[in-house]
Amino acid sequence: SSNIPKKIPMQSNPILAALDVPTPEKAIALAEEIYPHVGGFKIGLELFTAGGSKTVKTIQALGKEIFLDLKFHDIPNTVAKAVVNATKLNVQWMTIHCAGGSEMIKAAEQSAQETASSLGIAPPVILGVTVLTSMDQSQLNAIGVKHGVEDQVAALAEMAVLHGLRGLVCSPLELTRLRSLLPPSVHLVTPGIRAQKDAMGDQKRTLGPEEAIAAGASRLVIGRPIYAAPHPAEAALAITRILEETTD
């Protein structure tokens, strides 16, 4: 559709490479190998619990976007305080669980805005996680959610945006519906991206990178297709080239 940019300029490469490796040393080595071919790095729970903010700062020195994916979900005051500290790290993206509710969402967004303003930096985009991409209908039912997956995602997404969130994490297959429901300014960051030949791993709801961008993704979080490849830099470059070709 007309609102999708025809070409991704390379300085806004949409790939956020997931550094889902067991040690800070491996993560830093991987980041140093692939950084010319990606737009940024996702630092998740595995890496953050091993390396903490020191590892964030080391990887940040490569000059790329940082997505701190810790999925905060707690009482509003606790989440607000965690967001203060994450914002002080000057990361560009971070996650919270929409299931924490409207007060928690408002507290997180307000905390990010106020902290960034006091530091004179751009506020990070807080991304709401709706339904984890590993969950299917039977698992939702088991935790007492009677909505279908797509309806639950849509309900949480609309609630989150209503209460001030500027972005969401969503599965590739939810992009089209969310783009139709939400203001165009809302960032949609999409994990579960698989090149066609990749194993599904534990992601149940997937698309290829070019399909996800065409459907309206703002950023693509790509894990195994890069970090598990025999030559991660070559894998990252190949995906970037696919995106350049399909968005001409």
Image (cartoon, rainbow, N blue to C red):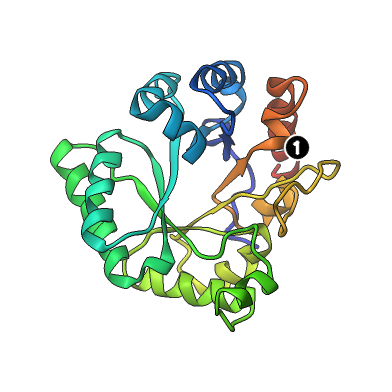
Looking at the rendered structure, the kind of residue marked 1 is Ile
Name the residue at the right extreme. Answer: 197
Task: Please give the name of the residue rendered at 45% of the width and 74% of the height, measured from the top-left corner.
Answer: 158
Task: Please give the name of the residue rendered at 57% of the width and 40% of the height, measured from the top-left corner.
Answer: 14
Q: Secondary structure at mark 1?
A: helix
Name the residue at the bottom extreme. Answer: 146
* Residue 178 screen position, x and y as percent: 56, 69
Task: Please give the name of the residue rendered at 32% of the width and 64% of the height, measured from the top-left corner.
Answer: 105
Q: Is residue 44 visible?
A: no
Instruction: Estimate how packed mark 1 is, as few (under 14), some (14 to 19) or many (20 or more) residues with alpha carbons within 10 Å.
Output: few
Compared to residue 93, the image places residue 20 above or below, namely: above
Locate residue 132: give its quadrant.
bottom right
* Residue 20 screen position, x and y as percent: 58, 34
Please state the total of marks drawn on the protein image.
1
* Residue 179 screen position, x and y as percent: 56, 67
Q: Is residue 206 visible?
A: yes
Compared to residue 167, the image places residue 29 above or below, namely: above
In the image, taking residue 68 as reference, residue 227 lies left or right, namely right
Compared to residue 55, the image places residue 196 above or below, namely: below
Q: Which residue is mark 1?
A: 242
Name the residue at the left extreme. Answer: 118
Q: Quadrant of the N terminus?
A: bottom right
Q: Quadrant of the C terminus?
A: top right
In the image, taking residue 200 as reference, residue 19 lies left or right, namely left
Task: Please give the name of the residue rendered at 62% of the width and 77% of the height, measured from the top-left corner.
Answer: 141
In the image, taking residue 227 as reference, residue 70 lies left or right, namely left
Residues 112 and 213: in front is 112
Residues 143 and 86: in front is 143
